[in-house]
Image: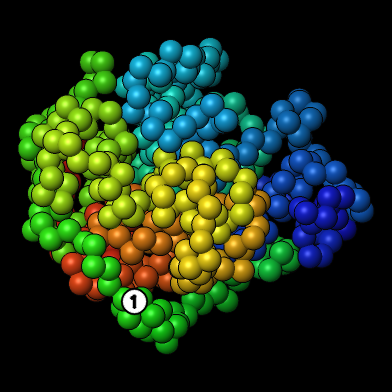
Amino acid sequence: MAGGVARNPLVRLAHPVNLDFSAGEHIAIVGPNGAGKSLLVDLLIGKYPLREGKLTYNFYPSTASTAYENIKYITFRDTYGTADANYYYQQRWNSHDLDDVPDVREILGDIKDKELQDELFSLFHIDPMLDKKIVLLSSGELRKFQLTKTLLSTPRVLIMDNPFIGLDAVTRTLLLDLLEHLSRKHALQLVLVLSMFDDIPPFVTHVVPVQGMTVGEKISRETYMNEFHFNENHSDAELLHARIVNLPYSDSNYTSKEVVKLNKVGIRYGERTILKELDWTVKRGEKWALSGENGSGKSTLLSLVCADNPQSYACDISLFGRKRGTGESIWEIKKHIGYVSPEMHRAYLKNIPAVDIVASGLHDSIGLYKRTHSDQVAICEWWMDIFGVVGLKDKPFLQLSGGEQRLTLLARAFVKDPELLILDEPLHGLDTFNRFRVKKIIEAFCSRRDKTLVMVTHYENELPTVITDKILLKRN
């Protein structure tokens, strides 16, 4: 691309783009959340018409000529599946509402390259997923499916946005090995879009830094790694800690010693058992790390706790000392729970101002359907400031980058100052700086009196220092 400037000012970078990817190079486009990485990729693949400059392709030795045929792009949002306007938050757990939803086998269709199929199916454990409806896949399984589907199309250029997020440790290692193997094939060029500056695989040859909507010069990986240094701002973390711990307490909290109690809970979908006779008690003030491989039932377990799963009413579950199904209002209980998850991110297709997304957390709705009072708006803006996105409060949610969306949804989870904080992969898609910031926010919040935490992550180093207990789920 020479002097590329998008015609639409809403998707225009700060300066014209001059960039070339040569044969044999494997590129990492690296930058913080909201820097303009996705806008750059959209420009390079021809999604936006140019007002100035020129975009040219040479896909040799591919016999196909169009960018559509040669370039495949897995975006950040693909982590959450192919959500559209017909998808809603609890659909994954409502088995009666799946008649028109395709299964994995249908979407993959007829596969010509059987050798590659066998390799990918083995790597990502696709066979057990083939007859599952697409919305029943966990976020990690969705990621594996999207990667498999895209790799089977044998593109000339494969662009992947944060390819390792949502994958358990074993699969991440296997995927890294696979990509390294693919990088040696001359007919495939890999382009990774990365938010984590320190997560650039060895097979990458060059880095394109993007900062402040400006595309930097392409440099060698070695040069970039030698020049990059992330300095933790402990003074900023201390300021955040002080602001959070000094928040006034509500006088409407529960006093039960047990926050969550599951007694021999089992969940089945058709022939598949997700959870089998699970006993689990979370006591007030405990901080739990919930782990397990992709598809082991972590998100399903949390959907039971949050009463988003219809099967929760057939299970022996107590929240805040109250047994489910004994007349308690689930909306009253939800007032005391803050929650963020891949499923929630997937369902948020509401193009309303970001501050309204945060405000929806006050009412436990997907979207905002109640008028927000000025004092509530002030609380929303306070938490958006804590998470560093208050400057985006009036920007439509779907115009935010994936990382900015995640920070907004995190502010939504904290806005009620909840007694029980449930964070399912909260650092997905966040850059190095924001991962550090959010970890410090979680630690500060959990230092407040009687706060209880359940957190899911596949990265051990993402866990805050406050963790007191751990539970590991195994796939049945």
Residue at the right extreme, as displayed: 52
Q: Classify residue 168 as left or right of residue 72.
A: left
The answer to whether residue 26 shows anywhere in this view is: no
Give the quadrant of the C terminus. top left
Q: Secondary structure at mark 1?
A: loop
Residue 449's spot in the image, x, y percent? 20, 72
Q: Residues within 10 Å of mark 1 (few under 14, many from 20)?
A: few
- Please give the name of the residue rendered at 76% of the width and 26% of the height, measured from the top-left corner: 64
Residue at the bottom extreme, as displayed: 235
> Image quarter for residue 264?
top left
- Please give the name of the residue rendered at 54% of the width and 26% of the height, measured from the top-left corner: 86
Of residues 43 and 7, the one nearer the viewer is 7
Colour mode of the rendering: rainbow
**Is 311 placed above or below 261 here?**
above
Residue 218's spot in the image, x, y percent? 70, 63
- Please give the name of the residue rendered at 48% of the width and 14% of the height, measured from the top-left corner: 100
**Is 241 placed above or below 36 here?**
below
Q: Classify residue 329 as left or right of residue 208.
A: left
Q: How many marks?
A: 1
> Image quarter for residue 153?
top right
- Please give the name of the residue rendered at 61% of the width and 54% of the height, measured from the top-left corner: 353
Residue 59's spot in the image, x, y percent? 76, 36
Residue 375's spot in the image, x, y percent? 48, 68
Of residues 20 and 342, the one nearer the viewer is 342
Q: Which residue is mark 1?
A: 247
The answer to whether residue 29 shows anywhere in this view is: yes
